[in-house]
């Protein structure tokens, strides 16, 4: 059995980690972990060296792995005890061990964690279980998010922890806490790494986090297409809560355009029912491209009540829309979409007022009030709010003290925002988008490279080259390769991404 004092053998004394090559670092840390794994498991549960507690003498930012082993062993033991009783005070929020875990998640060395990813993920899952058990899920939000960003500053490789975190945010109704994660592009999924080569080592300087967050790393549990769909559905709920309709629509479209074997999932059906409503808020209509036609047909057959509402909205008939919404009240309530239907009903009046500028240059407030069924006093406040939020390019004018107030529409070139400010804002938004596009382009290159070294792609290239060699040179052109078999239905959709 290994000597417990060996837990101080890494980082190696007298050697700067920056001076170690990836191969040297990899060999040193693997040997170190092998030594730690040879220590009696009861040592980690006891968590003491002589009269001192290991969690008091170890530095989580330096001695990351042994600190993690102690945390995991002690918390696991207490969680097992909890099955037959209440959650022990030590691992409740505010307890000593829970506080140590929160500190660890804020300070661990991410390079070392790449080699013990499964244990790192398990302690996060333990924290999630604990806070849910004691009814305080909000306490775990910041530590878990900090742990995710320490492990992957870009948050671009999708992991099971992404989904765990979004579930917590939705459960505690904390949409703003979800934004730091949701606003990062998902560019990769854990895949099978190719053996051999310096840049396949976890400690290598990888271009993207997908280089070390692999299926074998343990940093993520296995993820399926339904996990990804749930993540984007929860993300859409966050943006709906923040009334960011455009982003919500985009996230819902991610779900609806997921590759499918002509079969729609329950998550896709739920996403469609929200999407048709949100699309009306964003564009005034609903039109989807890129979805599987067979799957979409089955979804629409089960969502006729929603399509009827969209039809009533598009017609501009407020009475018809009101009747359709009232008729399906139990459906909206069961689906959790009552709030969206209310937004849609209110939005129809907004769209009606905005479309008036296609016919009128100006209109008396009293007339507008009668058109949208509001009192003259209420319509002035309503219209001013639309103008202030930038939805309506108009102004409320009163030619004289005795004259009635009118709503005067501006030309398209007229803007309430100063020109210089508008240009500066547009330039800033453009530069931000250019930067994001450049980053995405680099990630696409990396994804393409990963695809070219997969077994399936290599076999495909071999077959293609073989067919070319066997083609009659007198025919001209290349022989069409028809030997690329379709993927099996049960194949992991995330494997090659």
Image (cartoon, rainbow, N blue to C red):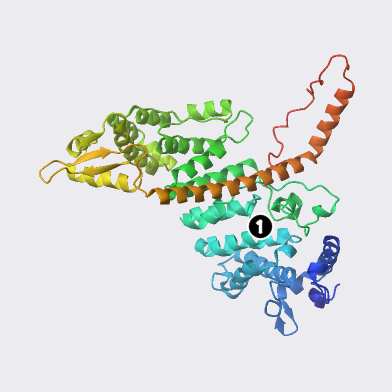
Instruction: From the top left corner, tell me how far across and down residue 477 is, in percent.
Output: 81, 19
Quarter of the image for residue 348 reads: top left
Tell me the residue that label 1 is attached to. 152
- Residue at left 83%, top 27%? 464
Q: Is residue 125 visible?
A: no
Front in this rendered view, residue 222 or 277: 277
Instruction: From the top left corner, tell me how far across and down residue 303 is, in percent.
Output: 46, 31
Front in this rendered view, residue 204 or 132: 204
Q: Residue furthest bottom?
A: 51
Element carrying mark 1: loop
Q: Where 488 falls versus 154 (above or below)?
A: above
Q: Is residue 440 left or right of residue 409?
A: right
Instruction: From the top left corner, tell me how far across and down residue 96 is, in percent.
Output: 59, 75
Q: Is residue 2 visible?
A: yes
Q: Residue furthest top?
A: 475
Give the quarter of the figure containing the N terminus.
Answer: bottom right
Front in this rendered view, residue 254 or 264: 254
Q: Is residue 350 left or right of residue 287?
A: left
Q: Where 457 falls versus 417 (above or below)?
A: above
Quarter of the image for residue 289 reads: top right
């Amino acid at each position: 059995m290994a000597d417990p004092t060996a837990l101080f053998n890494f980082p190696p004394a007298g050697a700067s980690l920056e001076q170690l090559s990836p191969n040297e670092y990899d060999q040193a840390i693997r040997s170190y972990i092998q030594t730690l794994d040879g220590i009696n498991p009861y040592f980690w549960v006891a968590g003491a060296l002589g009269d001192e507690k290991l969690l008091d003498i170890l530095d989580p930012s330096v001695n990351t792995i042994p600190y993690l082993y102690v945390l995991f062993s002690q918390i696991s033991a207490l969680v097992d005890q909890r099955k037959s009783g209440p959650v022990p005070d030590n691992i409740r929020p505010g307890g000593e061990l829970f506080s140590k875990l929160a500190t660890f998640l804020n300070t661990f060395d991410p390079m070392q964690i790449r080699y013990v990813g499964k244990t790192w993920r398990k302690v996060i899952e333990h924290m999630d279980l604990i806070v849910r058990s004691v009814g305080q899920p909000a306490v775990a939000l910041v530590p878990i998010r900090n742990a995710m960003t320490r492990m992957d500053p870009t948050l671009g490789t999708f992991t099971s922890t992404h989904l765990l975190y979004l579930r917590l945010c939705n459960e505690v109704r904390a949409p703003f806490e979800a934004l730091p994660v949701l606003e990062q592009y998902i560019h990769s999924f854990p895949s099978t790494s190719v053996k051999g080569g310096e840049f396949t080592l976890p400690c290598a300087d990888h271009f993207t986090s997908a280089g070390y967050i692999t299926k074998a790393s343990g940093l993520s549990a296995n993820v399926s297409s339904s996990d990804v769909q749930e993540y984007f559905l929860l993300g859409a709920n966050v943006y709906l809560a923040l009334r960011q309709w455009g982003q919500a629509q985009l996230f819902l479209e991610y779900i609806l355009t997921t590759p499918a074997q002509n079969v729609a999932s329950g998550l896709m059906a739920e996403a469609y029912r929200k999407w048709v409503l949100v699309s009306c808020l964003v564009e005034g209509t609903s039109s989807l491209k890129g979805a599987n036609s067979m799957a979409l047909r089955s979804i629409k057959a089960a969502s006729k009540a929603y399509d009827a509402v969209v039809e009533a909205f598009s017609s501009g008939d407020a009475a018809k829309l009101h009747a359709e919404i009232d008729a399906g009240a139990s459906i909206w309530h069961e689906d959790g979409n009552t709030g969206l239907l209310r937004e849609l009903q209110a939005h129809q009046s907004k769209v009606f007022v905005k479309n008036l500028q296609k016919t009128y240059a100006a209109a008396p407030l009293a007339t507008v009030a009668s058109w949208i069924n509001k009192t003259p006093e209420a319509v002035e406040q309503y219209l001013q709010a639309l103008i202030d939020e930038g939805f309506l390019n108009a102004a409320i004018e009163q030619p004289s003290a005795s004259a009635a107030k009118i709503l005067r529409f501006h030309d398209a070139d007229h803007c309430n925002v100063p020109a210089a400010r508008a240009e500066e804002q547009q330039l800033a938004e453009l530069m931000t988008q250019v930067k994001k596009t450049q980053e995405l382009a680099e990630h696409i290159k990396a994804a393409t490279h990963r695809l070219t070294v997969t077994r399936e792609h290599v076999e495909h290239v071999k077959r293609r080259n073989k067919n070319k060699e066997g083609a009659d040179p007198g025919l001209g052109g290349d022989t069409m390769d028809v030997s690329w078999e379709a993927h099996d239905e049960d194949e992991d959709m995330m494997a090659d991404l």
